Image: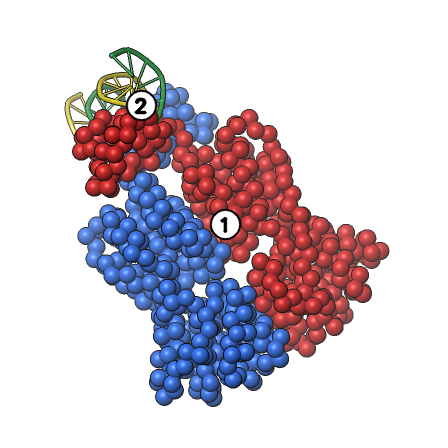
Chain colours: A blue, B red, C green, D yellow
Amino acid sequence: MNIMEFARFAGVSRSAVSRYFNNGYLSEEKRKQIEAAVEKTGYAPSVSAGNVSRRVTKLVGVILPKLSSESCARVTEGISEILDKEGYKILLVNTANDSSRETEALELFRNNRVDGVILLATVFSDIHKSVLNKMRIPVIIVGQHLKGFSCITHNDEGAARALTGLMLEKGGERPAMIAVTQDDVSAGMERLAGFKHALEAAGKKFDSKYVEYAGFDMESGYRAAKRLFLKNESPDCLLCATDNIAAGAELYCREAGIRIPEDVMICGVGNSKIGRAAYPSITTARLHYKTAGAEAALMLLSAVKHRDSIQRTLELDYDIVERESTGGKCETEFID
Amino acid sequence: MNIMEFARFAGVSRSAVSRYFNNGYLSEEKRKQIEAAVEKTGYAPSVSAGNVSRRVTKLVGVILPKLSSESCARVTEGISEILDKEGYKILLVNTANDSSRETEALELFRNNRVDGVILLATVFSDIHKSVLNKMRIPVIIVGQHLKGFSCITHNDEGAARALTGLMLEKGGERPAMIAVTQDDVSAGMERLAGFKHALEAAGKKFDSKYVEYAGFDMESGYRAAKRLFLKNESPDCLLCATDNIAAGAELYCREAGIRIPEDVMICGVGNSKIGRAAYPSITTARLHYKTAGAEAALMLLSAVKHRDSIQRTLELDYDIVERESTGGKCETEFID
DNA sequence: CTGAAAGCGCTAACAA
DNA sequence: TTGTTAGCGCTTTCAG
């Protein structure tokens, strides 16, 4: 059913119908008539047709690398919470870590004339940058700095530094780290940098022998821990780039009879649920993912409204959550 | 820029442009011209306008209760994988467990003229059902049976029964369960039913004293376990409706000095990552969430194509994953 | 407050 | 193969 048919059915003009669903400059009487007709027919105006008339879509494109990652899901939740309130819808693209799909997605968004884009960033190639620069609509980047764009970032470096510092203070002598690919700026470079800076601050020399690299899952953390411990003389404190990795490392330690925290202290980053369930529970840094998503949405909305709106970068800080893996006591109380 | 302007720029007719972006009944020469013009201008046709012309949107609505739940995220990943291949996009609504938002979402989808809807179900009220019945487009339900609709379900009853049976076989004498709200058919009713059936099969009487109820998170599991153990004489095997709950129960046991599996065996359901990280690692049933999502997408696509397509229900089976919490050995190998 | 009419950007049937 | 033309379903002036 289209607006004309419906208008006839309701016994009003098509403009009346349009007004009913929009601003509503309408007599009470017609309003009633239309309401009744809607009830009977289930008519609803086509958003697409409205889009072409109105020349806005109230649609926001969201690109993320992996939906089943806890952090991504939380960011998206934050985004969706804000956007929903304002009547914006989300066009979601899960790139499944295939970064070529990211440019495809940007393409898709251009076709769909979305009003803005939020990009959960991992790795940026030059292609990305050039495609991004061609976008003529607001783009907000979450999780990474990219010059020329508004960004929401986490203080990854600070979190890693604070965690490492914590272990050092507690008597760590031979610090080690399981990092992730340095292509990933925040989880990779920043966290490794934090680790290094903490060593510096404590007057320790950084030795790359004490750094292993893992993927983002627990299994990979398990294997990296194995390599690390077999290669080096017993590290006594270990920073892991993510909580998943830390959980994997704990698995290895248990298997190898290495006691936590007596023989080795362990930290993760991100405050994932897994860190609370793992045993010993994992000391970590909370990174406010959901807030990041919400702030990104807010920023985007403001950029959409005042098209002049200037770039801004918001860095969200971290909170240290100390648990058993560094000798903290296991909270009976839960955080969130 | 619109198609007419672009056509003029490229020196061709607007139909040529349309054909270039669609079927492409076009001479090589014009194709080249258009390609070059696209390169220069970044022109992309408006999907909305196409939608109104074509009377299809290539859009699928997805409603889910909680994006940050691991199972939901996995289902959505499965959906997105299939849909992407076919050029369908996802309009995502996260209801945040507020079921009134579900009907709103259905409304939204009607407006957007999505080609179909996938609903990750939890609780169904009568309002849901009536709204659902008014939909004139294909709807696929994941995670629950609803008569009149095509569904993908998991064998929750079987999984719960098998897990309980396993513990009973291993010598469990006083079985207990931490269930979730019976409003949730699959995680609630079905899993509780499976527990009961296993008791029956073993010639044991079901005693509701040995059932506690929790929410879906670890904290809630912790508290339910506390209530359970304080109220009853030591259950020696415990089925939890989800892995998160089981992880919470383990937390309580550790705190209370109850040994796992010596004093009590514990099982979860779902094969979440948390069960592998928890200590002792949690015996569980794998429920193939991602596959469920993929199958739902496939089903929807087929329903969209052959509008006559009949209802079908696909039940996905489970696999038992035995781990330390029931005395299984801890696999060094990882499952997925 | 209302209805007619002129678009919005695109597709597809048609005749050439 | 091509261009012309008549819509698709809706919004929004504009004159009443």
What numbered label is drawn on residue A13?
2
Amino acid type of the residue tagged 1 in the rendering: Glu
Asked which secondary structure carries label 2, the reply is loop
Residue A22 position within the rendered picture, expressed as x and y whole percent measured from the top left = 31, 36
The quarter of the picture where residue B251 lies is: bottom right
Q: Please state the chain letter of the residue tagged with numbered disc 2 in the rendered image.
A: A
What numbered label is drawn on residue B48?
none
The quarter of the picture where residue A191 lies is: bottom left
Give the position of the N terminus of chain B as an image quadrant.
top left
Residue B93 position within the rendered picture, expressed as x and y whole percent measured from the top left = 45, 46
Q: Single out the residue that lies furthest toward the front.
A: B28
Residue at 54% of width from left, 44% of height from top?
Answer: B294
- Is disc 2 surrounded by few (<14), some (14 to 19) or many (20+) residues within 10 Å? some
Asked which secondary structure carries label 1, the reply is helix
Residue that mark 1 sits on: B77
- Is disc 1 surrounded by few (<14), some (14 to 19) or many (20+) residues within 10 Å? many
Same subunit: marks 2 and 1: no
Residue B107 in the image: above or below residue A170: above
Amino acid type of the residue tagged 2 in the rendering: Ser
Nearest to the observer: residue A111 or residue C1: A111
Q: Is residue A92 left or right of residue B117?
A: left
Whether residue B98 is visible, yes or no, is: no
Q: Single out the residue that lies furthest toward the right.
A: B203
